Image (cartoon, rainbow, N blue to C red):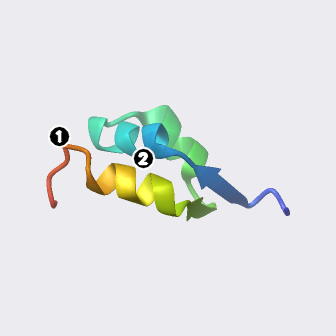
Amino acid sequence: MSGIEILVDTNIILYLPDGNKAVAEALQGRDIAVSVITELEVKGYHRLQKD
């Protein structure tokens, strides 16, 4: 792995809408990979809105 790609889990994705700047900065400019399980967990999270 070149250090540019990063695999994120559900918690990281859920921190972004709350305005977590540290997470946003850590992901800036990186190619982000998400597992199928993480995708399903995020889609099923009850507090997320479509926007």
Per the image, label 2 sits on a secondary structure element best described as: helix
The CA span between labels 1 and 2 is 13 Å
The residue that appears at 85% across and 62% down in the rendered structure is 1
> From what the image shows, is residue 38 above or below residue 17?
below
Residue nearest the observer in this picture, 34 or 30: 34
State the mark number for residue 47. Answer: 1
Question: Which mark is first along the chain, 2 or 1?
Answer: 2
Describe residue 34's horizontal placement relative to residue 20 as left or right: right
Task: Pinpoint residue 40: horizontal percent, then vertical percent.
Answer: 37, 57
Q: Is residue 19 left or right of residue 39?
A: left
State the quadrant of the C terminus.
bottom left
Q: Which residue is mark 2?
A: 13
Amino acid type, label 1: Arg
Q: Assess disc 2: are there few (<14), some (14-19) or many (≥20) residues with their C-alpha within 10 Å of its C-alpha.
A: some
Tell me the element at label 1. Answer: loop
Residue 38: image location, x then y, percent: 46, 53
How crowded is the residue under tag 1: few (<14 C-alpha within 10 Å), some, or many (20+)?
few
- The answer to whether 11 appears left or right of 47 in the picture is right
The residue at the point 56 percent across, 54 percent down is 28
Residue 48 x %, y %:
20, 47
- In the image, residue 49 lies at what x, y percent? 14, 52
**What is the count of numbered marks?**
2
